[in-house]
Image (tube, grey):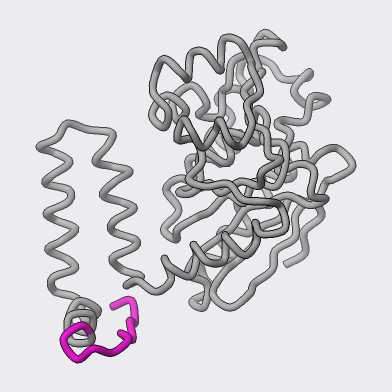
Amino acid sequence: MKFSNIEVTKENQIGFIKINRPEVRNALNKETLEEFINALNLLKDDQEVGCVVFTGAGGKSFAAGADISQLKEKTMLDAFNPSGMQNVYTVIESYEKPTIAMVNGFAIGGGCELAMACDIRIASANAKFGLPELNLSIIPGAGGTQRLARIVGKGKALEMILTGKIITAEEAYRIGLVTDFVESDHLLEKVKETAGQILAKGPLAVKLAKLSVNLGTETDMQTGLMIEKLAQAILFSSEDKNEGTAAFLEKRTPNFQGK
């Protein structure tokens, strides 16, 4: 499959989706969003890929947000477009394979929202984060008002959104927006290390753990606990559970099959 706005590569069990528009700081136009979906479908069907990493080309910007030239032309009904940014990010958040945002520069507006749609966010020390949409008299409409509040808390989310402040990787780490930040030269190494830790786990357990957290945090405690219990019931009857427990008792590395 050919792509014009992104690069899709694979290294071992990691699939990389790199936004390749450095001349516009990897701004996210509708064509790029469409290619995200195609790339995710491609990697979903690849049984060798167990984790997907989003990043940006050029080293200066992860993604600088929506393409303003296209944003200027949007009308009221465009907010309900099924192929719009909010819906694409919902696909990423609910993607069956774990996702990591490798934030190697500016993650502003839709770029910050893209990072928040991923399961884990790891940043370079020079990364910057912000949701400055109110400067354009719009709001962060690709999940920003909802995911940021859930990740860092309502008060900090309101401060960032209402002021449009841009924060450093260090502050993003302090408030819990990113899980770690490292020097740029070590970013890929750190991402691969984290992906490797996930890939060493039972893939069916990874999938159901992600599902349990995502669905459970959107409902009340008792319903969340039932989701957890049902997921565990599936895992108790899996071949991978038998393999994992046997490997532990036999002091060897498990050979999971995702069954």
Q: Give the magenta-colored segment's residue range.
A: 248-259
Which SS type dominates the magenta stretch?
loop
- Residue 256 falls within the magenta-colored stretch: yes
Q: Nearer the viewer, residue 191 or 210?
A: 191
Residue at the image point whose x is 49% and y is 76% from the top: 47
Q: Is residue 157 left or right of residue 6?
A: left
Say which quadrant the C terminus sits in.
bottom left
Residue 181 horizontal/vertical position (percent): 58, 46
Residue 186 horizontal/vertical position (percent): 66, 59
Q: Nearer the viewer, residue 103 or 237?
A: 103
Residue at the image point whose x is 68% and y is 39% from the top: 127
18 above or below 48?
A: above
Residue 174 horizontal/vertical position (percent): 48, 33
Give the tally of numbered discs: 0
Q: Is residue 218 left or right of residue 31?
A: left
| Residue 251 visible to the viewer | yes
Q: Nearer the viewer, residue 12 or 189?
A: 189
Residue at the image point whose x is 17% and y is 31% from the top: 220
Q: Is residue 74 left or right of residue 243?
A: right
Question: Which quadrant would residue 216 be assigned to in this image?
Answer: top left
Say which quadrant the N terminus sits in.
bottom right
Q: Is residue 41 left or right of residue 128?
A: left
Residue 121 horizontal/vertical position (percent): 53, 46
126 above or below 56?
A: above
Most extreme residue toward the right is 23
- Residue 14 falls within the magenta-colored stretch: no
Residue at the image point whose x is 35% and y is 70% from the top: 203
188 above or below 124?
A: below
| Residue 36 visible to the viewer | no
